[in-house]
Image (spheres, rainbow, N blue to C red):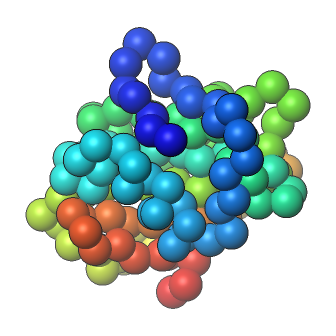
Amino acid sequence: MCLQAGPALGFDPPERVAITGAADAIAWARTIPAFGWYPEVYVLFLSAEGALRRAAWLGTAATLDDFTTWPDFSLGYLPPGGASAVMLLVCRPGRGVEPSGSDRQVFELLRLAHDASGVLLADAVLVDGRRWHSMAAC
């Protein structure tokens, strides 16, 4: 399966895609041409059973820091019927995958906003080319 970036920002998979953690999310995202090599953010909405319900592409201008102002911004892309959890894939080539102090603060702010909405923030995964880092594992 491949998410084609275009006029539609969301992709709802026609069959079940299991996402049990960051490694599964990265494996799925690697089906997207050039994933990890351009600055962009993807939001994965997961069911309670760990199935991908929707993937939303937030574009090439989005960064993790953008969520400081609107930490629940990604929730505007929730699929019909909602989701149990959200995972962010933040591609930032050339910046490495080691989270900065600012990255950690944004991650905690995101967790609080998502907890308040009832949709768990499962992870924010930082991606630089082939390398990636799960912030939930910190």
Identity of the residue drawn at 74% across and 53% down: 51
The x, y position of residue 23, in whole percent, is 51, 73
Residue positioned 57% across, 30% down in the render: 11
Measuring from the top left, give residue 48's x and y in whole percent.
86, 57
What residue occupies the far left of the structure in this picture?
Answer: 94
Residue 117: image x %, image y %?
80, 46
Q: Residue furthest top?
A: 7
Q: Residue furthest bottom?
A: 138
Q: Residue visible at 27% across and 55% down? A: 36
Q: How many marks?
A: 0
Instruction: Depth check: give the residue in front, 39 or 19.
Output: 19
**Horizontal side of residue 102 vs 87, given as left or right:** left
Q: Is residue 121 visible?
A: no
Dividing the picture into quadrants, the one containing residue 100 is: bottom left
* Whole-percent x, y for residue 43 in the image: 54, 45
| Picture quadrant of residue 62 | top left
Residue drawn at 87 percent across, 31 percent down: 81
When the figure is inspected, residue 40 is found, relative to residue 9, above or below; the finding is below
| Picture layout, residue 48 above or below residue 63 | below
Q: Is residue 127 visible?
A: yes
